[in-house]
Amino acid sequence: MSIAEAPQTTDAPIIGVFDSGFGGLTVLRALLTRLPHARFAFLGDTARLPYGSKSRRTIARYAAESARFLVREQGAQFLVIACNTASALALDAIQDAVPVPVLGVIEPGASAAKASSQSGGVFVIATEATVQSHAYAAACQAQGMHVLEKACPLLVPLVEEGWTQHPVTAEVIRIYLDELARGAQAQGISADTLLLGCTHYPLLRPLIERAVPAGVRVIDSAEAAAEAATRIFNGHIHAPGSASLPEPRMRFFATDSVEKFERLGSRFLGRPVGRVELVDLGG
């Protein structure tokens, strides 16, 4: 379904948000402040992560199953794919699987980088799987930018360990950015924008902003996706007739490790996630 064909409703609509884990809660966090007349259903496919080690075909199947759960069983009228790997490798399969508008994080991030950059050069830091997909590079190059990607595999476990302000994390970031700068110099690329291509990285933004050279702007793909969703969905979302939204405003689902989701999820969402419901999507 195209965005133009999206249903309009006088009820509080449900936006489904999907991730392979719970890093995508940073996207939901950004959505909550921008779409106050929406309800949200968040699914973390924690039983089958990491997606990055799977084939494209398997990722597409997993992501399509998750999308159908949110649409068919939770009534989502819009979907935001808050997973870089699924956005990079399975967006078409998700769009084919459900009859509602679907937004990924790759294109909004590239567009935000384009709007930020004056030099036309952008650095992208992301997980190994996202970098290997070259999805951000392709999206940025399609908009006429020069891009250099850097995989930063240590950052996700550091975030999940809670070391978001730790000196060790700051040093790891410095090392990665130094390596990126040397790679850029070797290739003759000058960049004034750094795009965070992983939904875990917003929790490291203060450390990253302190580590980048002066004049380099940091762009958060989670914020960019939420901004894009707001522009797209607002025209189809009307305030509910009552003064308050039906409860609960948010529901959380995971395919495994609900205790870990409940424990760590608040770190990404910036508020308690409360109860997480266990669902079985198959193997």
Image: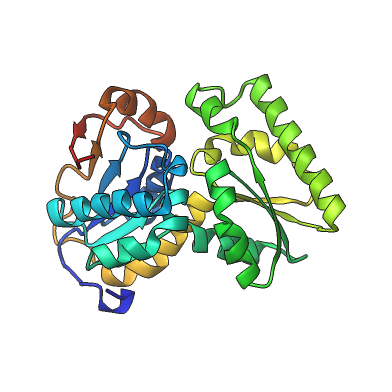
Classify 55 as above or below 166: below
Give the quarter of the image for residue 21.
top left
In-image side of 211 versus 246 (left or right):
right
The reply to whether residue 55 is in sight is yes
Q: Position of residue 24 (x, y in %)?
A: 41, 43
In-image side of 43 versus 19 (left or right):
left
Q: Position of residue 91 (x, y in %)?
A: 39, 61
Using the image as rendered, state which of residue 282 and residue 6 is in the foreground: 282
In-image side of 233 versus 178 (left or right):
left
Residue at x 51% of width, y 64% of height: 107
Residue at x 33% of width, y 24% of height: 260
The quarter of the image holding the C terminus is top left
Classify 176 as above or below 10: above
Using the image as rendered, state which of residue 257 and residue 112 is in the foreground: 257
Give the quarter of the image for residue 11.
bottom left
Residue at x 18% of width, y 54% of height: 243
